[in-house]
Image (cartoon, helix red, strand yellow):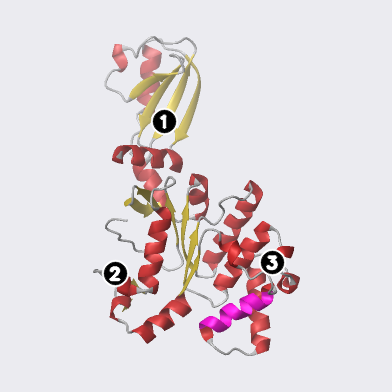
Amino acid sequence: VSHFSLSVPKGRRVGFIGESGSGKTTTALAAMRMLAAPGFVAGGSIRLNGVGGTDLLGLNDEEMRRVRLRKISYIPQGAMNSLNPVMRVETQIWDGIVAHEGHVEPGELQRRSREVLAGVGLEPHVGQLYPHELSGGMKRRVMIAKALSHEPDILFLDEPTAGVDVELRRDMWEMVRGLRASGVTIILTTHYIEEAEEMADRVGVINHGEIVVVEEKNRLMKKLGKKQLAVHLRAPLAAIPDALSGRPLELADDGHTLVYSFDAQADESGIPELLKKLGEIGVDFRDLRTHESSLEEIFVSLVRARA
């Protein structure tokens, strides 16, 4: 990973997208390691709670241990395999709380474990089960519950829905959206463009170990996306008429569609003038449709530009 620089507002969700081998997991691990073990960093600064907040590079080992245990959780790929097969779910969540906070009264442990299970959509009775009695989706939820049991400020999710079916993936999206409401800051990696579009507020594109861009999702789509008007013609054109030269037009669908690209944020789109000109030169059309770039199209264009 080269020249890593990232700022995440509290309670936001940042999704890193990239092809397999692009460096997504390395980036997540690097960010997590820099937060959890600042000695790993050669230079720069790492701050929690804004510019005036704590610079982790200045903390001693004991201070850093408190920050790491109380504020940060990380769920790697394949995390389901880390559940203890001979320990009930609730006991594993208890162990997670105690490991981070020290002694906690049994009644408080039970209350918090049930609360965190409910927070990820699991019934209290799940806590009495063993991992082999759970479905794959339930195991993933248990891992998130365990990671949230000590109420961290920051949660890293590395490919949280890799290998699950579409229905479970959407359930996971809904759950992660709900975590934002509780104030948890989430940094996730995914190779599903749709997942980043659904789950993230900000999107980072990674290509060959380089962070190409990190931007608010909606701003990125407005800035780098484009809007197109597809004019479906009654008769095909062999070429764009000279009277239309100079406009951002191209032919598609074997000359049956005239595609006009325009800036949706501009004061004037140019569409009324285009349609008027088509009428003047006798080009008839039967339908009009607009299309706005998806996050996937923007991702592909960014990666190709760096190829």
Residue 27, image quadrant? bottom left
What residue is pinned by disc 2?
Answer: 41
- Queried whether the magenta region covers residue 245, the answer comes back as no
Please state which amino acid type lies under the numbered disc 1.
Answer: Gln
User: Could you tell me which secondary element the residue under label 3 belongs to?
Assistant: helix
Which mark is nearer the camera, 3 or 1? 3
Q: Is residue 114 visible?
A: no
Residue 299, image quadrant? top left
- Queried whether the magenta region covers residue 98, the answer comes back as yes
What residue is drawn where x is 60% and y is 80%? 95
On-image quarter of the N terminus? bottom left
What residue is pinned by disc 3?
Answer: 131
Q: CA distance from mark 2 to mark 3?
A: 37 Å
What residue is drawn where x is 29% and y is 72%? 51
Residue 34 percent coordinates (x, y): 35, 69
Q: Residues within 10 Å of mark 3 (few under 14, many from 20)?
A: many
Residue 263 percent coordinates (x, y): 35, 36
What residue is drawn where x is 38% and y is 68%? 33
Q: CA distance from mark 3 to mark 1?
A: 51 Å
What residue is pinned by disc 1?
Answer: 228
N-terminal-most mark, 2 or 3: 2
User: Magenta stretch?
Assistant: 90-100
Left/right of residue 227 with respect to residue 169 in the rendered view: left
User: Could you tell me which secondary element the residue under label 2 belongs to?
Assistant: loop
Please state which amino acid type lies under the numbered disc 3.
Answer: Pro
| Image height of 199 relative to 228, above or below | below
Q: Residues within 10 Å of mark 2 (few under 14, many from 20)?
A: some
Residues 182 and 161: in front is: 161
